[in-house]
Image (tube, helix red, strand yellow):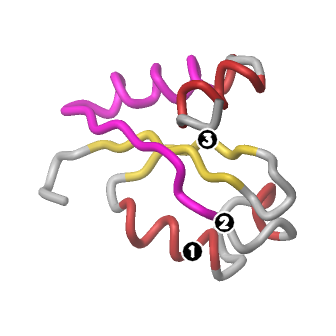
């Protein structure tokens, strides 16, 4: 990933729930979640699997999209990540 890239991602946790986040280093962040060092939500729900991501040029665009995805229903998230 090049400098200045902002990524919104969706993980599927071992319990089947989704977690949406933001990062500038996708591989590192997914590894942190998988190791139990990521967000509090994912700590007890490992292993996690990266299901979806989008790249943006600005942090504000990415953060806005992260918020939009977090507001989606479970069914809409399943469609987004291609599970439905």
Q: Which residue is mark 1?
A: 32
Residue at the (42%, 72%) spot, across then down = 28
Residue at the (41%, 43%) spot, across then down = 53
Give the spatial CA distance, label 2 vs label 1: 10 Å
Label whose residue precedes the other's in the sequence (1 or 3): 3
Q: Nearer the viewer, mark 2 or mark 1?
A: 2
**Residue 59, above or below 1:** above
Would you call the spot at circle 1 few (<14 residues within 10 Å), some (14-19), or many (20 or more)?
some
Give x and y (percent) for residue 7.
Answer: 36, 44
Q: Residue furthest front?
A: 84
Q: Which residue is mark 3?
A: 20
Q: Quadrant of the N terminus?
A: bottom left
Question: In the figure, is residue 5 to the left or right of 51?
Answer: left
Give x and y (percent) for residue 61.
Answer: 34, 22
**Residue 31, above or below 55:** below
Q: Nearer the viewer, mark 2 or mark 3?
A: 2
Q: Secondary structure at mark 1?
A: helix
Q: Secondary structure at mark 2?
A: loop
Residue range (magenta) = 49-69
Q: Residue furthest left?
A: 2
Q: Which residue is mark 2?
A: 48
């Amino acid at each position: 990933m090049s400098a200045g890239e902002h990524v919104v991602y969706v993980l599927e946790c071992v319990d089947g729930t989704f977690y949406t986040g933001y990062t500038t280093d996708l591989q590192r962040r997914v590894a942190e979640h998988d190791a139990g060092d990521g967000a509090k939500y994912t700590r007890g729900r490992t292993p996690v699997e990266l299901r979806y991501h989008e790249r943006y040029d600005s942090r504000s665009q990415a953060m806005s999209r992260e918020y939009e995805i977090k507001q989606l229903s479970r069914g809409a998230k399943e469609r987004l990540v291609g599970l439905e």
